[in-house]
Image (tube, rainbow, N blue to C red):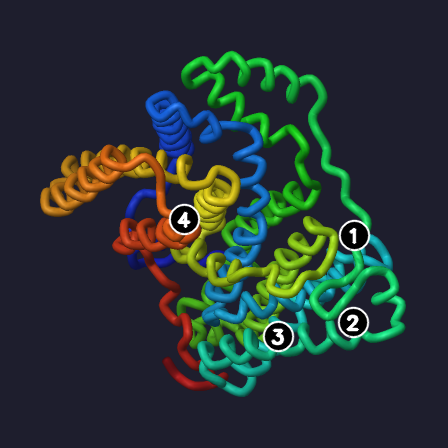
């Protein structure tokens, strides 16, 4: 019944037209053209190399899964900054089960560990009305203490089976590997095109080959989860009910929807996705390792905000941060230095768009920033190590600053809800 209700006010996103497929393809083509241009101008071939983009996908998946988990929670009206702690629980559970029963069992265990964290957050915020931020911080602190304590007990215990297999209080014994797959024929053909170093064509081949060469099955699972989330939350009555809990839970309740149940389901899924992100990290390095999450839960929150609480936006944000993380990890200062020119060109493009829309002040400011980035690139040859390490986080701040005005949070996010109370 609720699925038939049509909103009378502005559509989600303030009535602005959505990103259509032609626009999306145009943006992708433009981004690839800029990458090709910068690659030629700077002679940094790794910008479009297959290995670079394979690493970018590897870094992007756990961030994207955390961001997708945050989307489920916040679309239901619950702020979830406990994603980092839920990733830790998933990472530990995957490492604990994985070395005994294999990597696929580790994936299931990681999801269960994250779900438990999500349900704790639901119990605190939905049932007992604890402040969402306080509960999330508490879960992060509690999860860190729990996994470190259990690692000492189960992996580092003197004379234990885990210790004999190579575990200690900082890591679990190693598990088996999930073998990646390649698409025969297509992978080799794209590799041949990439070796020609033709402008745009070879660059496109290098990027596309990352999608068909040595791909992890968990990456495929992550893509399916993004598609499934979109279809479930935006194309079904269940999704409409869940999203309405984050917009106006009192009105949703008046239509006979159990708001508490939907919030619990959303937080369980949110924790499960974050736990899957932790399990991905454990399967990637074939063990639990203390501190392996490395703040990816917080980066997931940033991708959720950047993506305007939409699955496609979260995926794009995760891809961007994964790309920058791979650059600073694999390429070092010279490659990150080349991105100064890339960002300058992007800002010039955004400035032109703002000028076209009549926002002259914003356009002039963007041109000024682009000029400063170009000057920085021109007078230097590399980036200091400290800035190279911080480049993914600086990119996060830059992107969120540029897109802050187009964000629209769910209206009831973070607000306390009690059954039977009027709005």
Q: Residue at x 45, y 52 (%)?
A: 310
Q: What is the spatial separation of the Cα atoms under label 3 and label 2, in whole angstroms? A: 18 Å
Comparing 382 with 217, the one in front is 382
**Vertically, is 189 above or below 73?**
above
Mark number displayed over residue 156:
2
Which residue lies under the disc numbered 1? 103
Give the foreground label among 3 and 4. Answer: 4
User: Image quadrant for the C terminus?
Assistant: bottom left
- Is the residue marked by circle 2 packed among few (<14), some (14-19), or many (20+) residues within 10 Å? many
Q: What is the spatial separation of the Cα atoms under label 4 and label 2, in whole angstroms? A: 35 Å
Which residue lies under the disc numbered 3? 143
- Is the residue marked by circle 4 packed among few (<14), some (14-19), or many (20+) residues within 10 Å? few
Which residue lies under the disc numbered 4? 385
Q: Earlier in the sequence, mark 1 or mark 3?
A: 1
Q: Earlier in the sequence, mark 3 or mark 2?
A: 3
Q: What is the spatial separation of the Cα atoms under label 1 and label 3, in whole angstroms? A: 22 Å
């Amino acid at each position: 019944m609720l699925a038939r209700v049509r909103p009378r006010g502005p559509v989600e996103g303030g009535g602005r037209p959505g990103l259509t497929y032609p626009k999306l393809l145009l943006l992708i083509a433009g981004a690839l053209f800029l990458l090709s241009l910068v690659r030629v101008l700077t002679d940094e071939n790794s910008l479009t190399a297959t290995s670079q983009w394979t690493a970018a996908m590897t870094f992007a998946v756990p961030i994207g899964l955390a961001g997708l988990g945050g989307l489920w929670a916040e679309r239901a009206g619950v702020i979830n900054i406990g994603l980092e702690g839920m990733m830790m629980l998933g990472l530990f559970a995957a490492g604990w089960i994985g070395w005994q029963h294999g990597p696929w069992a580790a994936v299931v265990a990681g999801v269960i560990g994250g779900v438990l964290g999500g349900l704790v957050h639901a119990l605190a915020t939905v049932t007992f009305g604890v402040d969402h931020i306080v509960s999330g911080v508490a879960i992060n602190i509690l999860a860190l203490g729990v996994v470190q304590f259990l690692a000492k007990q189960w992996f580092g215990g003197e004379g234990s089976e885990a210790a004999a297999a190579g575990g200690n209080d900082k890591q679990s014994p190693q598990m088996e590997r999930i073998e990646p797959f390649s698409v025969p024929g297509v992978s080799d053909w794209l590799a041949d095109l990439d070796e020609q170093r033709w402008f745009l064509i070879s660059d496109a081949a290098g990027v596309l080959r990352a999608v068909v060469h040595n791909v992890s099955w968990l990456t495929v699972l992550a893509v399916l989860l993004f598609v499934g989330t979109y279809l479930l939350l935006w194309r079904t009555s269940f999704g409409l009910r869940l999203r309405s809990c984050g917009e106006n839970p009192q009105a949703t309740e008046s239509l006979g929807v159990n708001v508490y149940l939907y919030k619990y389901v959303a937080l369980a899924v949110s924790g499960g996705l974050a736990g899957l992100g932790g399990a991905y990290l454990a399967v990637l390095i074939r063990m639990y390792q203390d501190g392996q999450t490395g703040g990816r839960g917080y980066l997931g929150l940033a991708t959720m905000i950047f993506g305007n609480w939409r699955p496609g936006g979260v995926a794009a944000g995760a891809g961007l941060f994964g790309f920058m993380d791979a650059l600073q990890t694999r390429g070092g200062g010279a490659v990150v230095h080349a991105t100064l020119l890339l960002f300058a060109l992007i800002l010039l493009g955004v400035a032109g768009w703002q000028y076209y829309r009549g926002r002259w002040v914003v356009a002039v400011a963007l041109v000024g920033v682009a000029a400063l980035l170009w000057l920085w690139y021109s007078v230097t040859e590399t980036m200091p190590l400290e800035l190279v390490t911080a480049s993914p986080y600086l990119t996060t701040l830059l992107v969120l600053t540029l897109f802050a005005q187009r964000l629209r949070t769910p209206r009831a996010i973070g607000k306390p809800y009690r059954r039977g109370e009027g709005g």
